[in-house]
Amino acid sequence: MRVIIQNDYENLSLWAARYIANRIRAFEPNANRPFVLGLPTGSSPLGTYAELIRLNREGYVSFANVVTFNMDEYVGLARDHEQSYYTFMWKNFFNHIDIKAENVHILDGTAKDLEEECRSYEDAIAAFGGIELFLGGIGADGHLAFNEPFSSLSSRTRIKSLTYDTKVMNSRFFDHDMSKVPSQALTVGVKTVSDSREVIILVNGHNKARALQATIEGGVSQSWTCSALQLHPKALIVCDEAACGELKVDTYKYFKDIEGDNLSVAAMLK
Ligand SMILES: N[C@@H]1[C@@H](O)[C@H](O)[C@@H](COP(=O)(O)O)O[C@@H]1O
């Protein structure tokens, strides 16, 4: 596992966006061989999306041959609901880049047969040859996508009930009214994420410090689903100083030292 520690959220976002842009450029995707990118919602990726939009507008990276799969979606929210993840993604990212609408995949939380919706999502990922790079965030309880604590580490896309804590956290988007927060979501599984050839997780802020500690230093455990990344051959954590509060000094120093030359945000633009 690599851990990139940036001073603040701004630099974390620039570094992550430039890394992703460079990966897409190096892949040289075309219509027959698209770059398959997994994407999250939430506040963590907003800065990364903003920089990717800027890089796209400047002509540094194109999404014309990028295929995306989003991590999750609330059950029961229509796509045009202002808090659906569908709305979030178009508003904050897809509307501003040169991606083709037919290349965007987002689970439909209003599908008649939700189990079939999940199965066909996994089939669609497989049909594209799997995901090249999955970008994600984590919840304060370490959830990856909506894989809440004690989700199976070999889980696939399925329906999950949200924990009380997650509903409280997400109620900020629903007028702070818990009763408006959907109780269930469709989510890719831990295994769906970890089957990707590369995983990048953004972790910022003090409230994620325990989750970051569990991801890097704790044992692999279903109680912190993010810890499954320890078994991944190419997992990359991009975090800010604030999120490092629970790491051992030695751990912190190790990653700062070993990644020293790689931390420059400016040097990421080729
Ligand atoms: N399902 C999403 C996750 O994919 C996200 O990583 C997490 C953290 O959100 P934020 O980035 O806003 O802290 O919350 C949500 O519940």
Image (cartoon, rainbow, N blue to C red):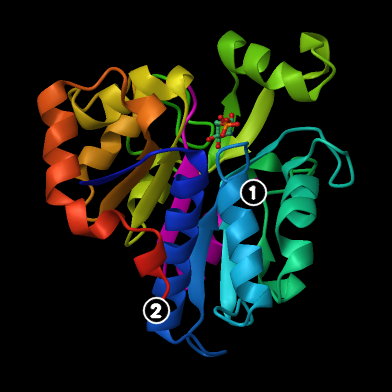
Rendered residue at 28%/36% (across/down): 228
Is residue 54 highlighted in magenta?
A: no
Query: Which image quarter: residue 217?
Result: top left
Rendered residue at 73%/52% (across/down): 92
Is residue 131 highlighted in magenta?
A: yes
Give x and y (percent) for residue 253.
14, 34
150 vs 253, left or right, is right
Mark 1 residue type: Glu
Q: Which residue is mark 1?
A: 116
Position of residue 72 relative to residue 207, above or below, is below
Position of residue 105 relative to residue 143, above or below, is below
Q: Which residue is mark 2?
A: 270
User: What number of labels is visible?
Assistant: 2
Segment colored magenta: 116-141
Disc 1 residue lies near ligand 1 with CB under 8 A: no
127 vs 99, left or right, is left
